[in-house]
Image (cartoon, grey):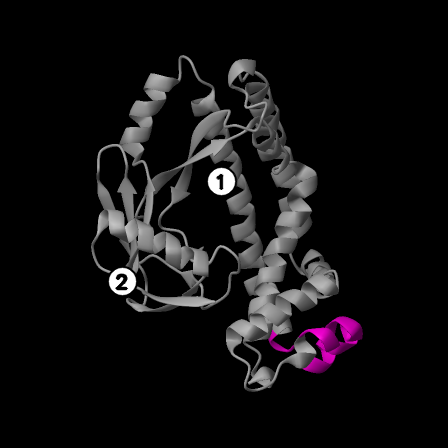
Amino acid sequence: MSWMDVQGKIYHCLECGASIPVEHEGGRRPTQVSDLVVWEQMELAGRHGGSDDYLHEEGLCPGCVDALEQREAPRSPAAKIAKLHAELVDLASSLQRRIFDAIQETAGEWLERLTQSELRSIDPAAFSTTLGKASRDSAPEEIHELACNYLEQSNNALGGVLREHLHQATGLAEMEEEYAGRVGPLIDRLVAVIDKVPMETAGLDDSPAVVLFFAKDTSARESLNPLVEYEATVRQPVDPGSGTFFVSTPLAQTQLNGMAKAFLPENVTSIVEDVLAQIIAGRIAAMKSFR
């Protein structure tokens, strides 16, 4: 895994040429990224120049997206799809934030009390082939990876224990029901728009059907490594209201259909489990018993 000294990120609008800098909390410090990110950033830095301390991302600023949608809307469903997708992402992101808050409020102490013995007792076989190989000399990122493997091999049995704890101590079930009730109508509208994508541009051979500009909250914490997420990969922007940027993504018809399915109410469980797995892996990696 690769590391880069990162101070912030610069968003570049490909339409008007605007550059939008976003500073990260903690200033310039080593951040763990993937090898692919390093190569991508070398290419982007070659196009945009500037300091090596900043990552780069390309797309469109809000003003240019509005202008593009006004031009495209009469003949393309892309604007409607992007708008509905943004609403669905907001709902899913809100659910994730509420779950994070619930875990911090009710399960933080429970996770802090976890011991190696308890992890071993939940699934001895999975522990022996993963976390059982960790030592006090293991780096945090190594332990994090072993923790992720442990959760996967044990079918996230620990997550199931924590999930039961949350159901008893918080309104997690109510959160899921509320999400399901609000997301259903939006999914129906999204499917209806996707069904109207003209056949001649529907990407039947998996060529792009439409190009969408997905909204990205530039003030939100993000993992700079697309493969994992833990303390060494996550950075938080300094300005909590720095704004929105739009990243272009060409999608084929099969991907459009998958987009709608990703937000189905029955997939709420996977959203919850993903959040739990990331938090649990991070806590395990920070356990003093592995130091």
**Can residue 220 be seen?**
yes
User: Circle 1 is placed at which residue position?
Assistant: 90
Closer-to-camera residue (147/105): 147
Choose the circle earlier in sequence order: 2 or 1.
2
Where is residue 164? Give x, y as percent: 73, 60
Where is residue 11? Give x, y as percent: 29, 46
Residue type beneath disc 2: Asp
Residue at 52% of width from left, 52% of height from top?
97
Query: Which corner quadrant of the image does residue 42 belong to?
Result: bottom left
Where is residue 59? Give x, y as percent: 34, 38
**Can residue 171 be seen?**
no
Classify mark 2: helix, strand or loop.
loop
Give the crowd class for mark 2: few <14, some 14-19, many >=20 residues within 10 Å.
some
Give the crowd class for mark 1: few <14, some 14-19, many >=20 residues within 10 Å.
few
Question: Quick check: is 115 in the magenta stretch?
Answer: yes
As drawn, 76 above or below 35: above
Classify mark 1: helix, strand or loop.
helix
Q: How far apart are marks 2 and 1 (CA)?
A: 30 Å
User: Circle 2 is placed at which residue position?
Assistant: 53
Q: Are marks 2 and 1 in contact (CB under 8 Å)?
A: no
Total numbered labels placed on residues in the image: 2
Residue type beneath disc 1: Asp
As drawn, 27 above or below 46: below
Q: What stretch is highlighted in magenta?
A: 112-130
Residue at 69% of width from left, 68% of height from top?
150
Where is residue 183? Give x, y as percent: 60, 33
Left or right of 123 in this view: 141: left
Closer-to-camera residue (120/182): 120
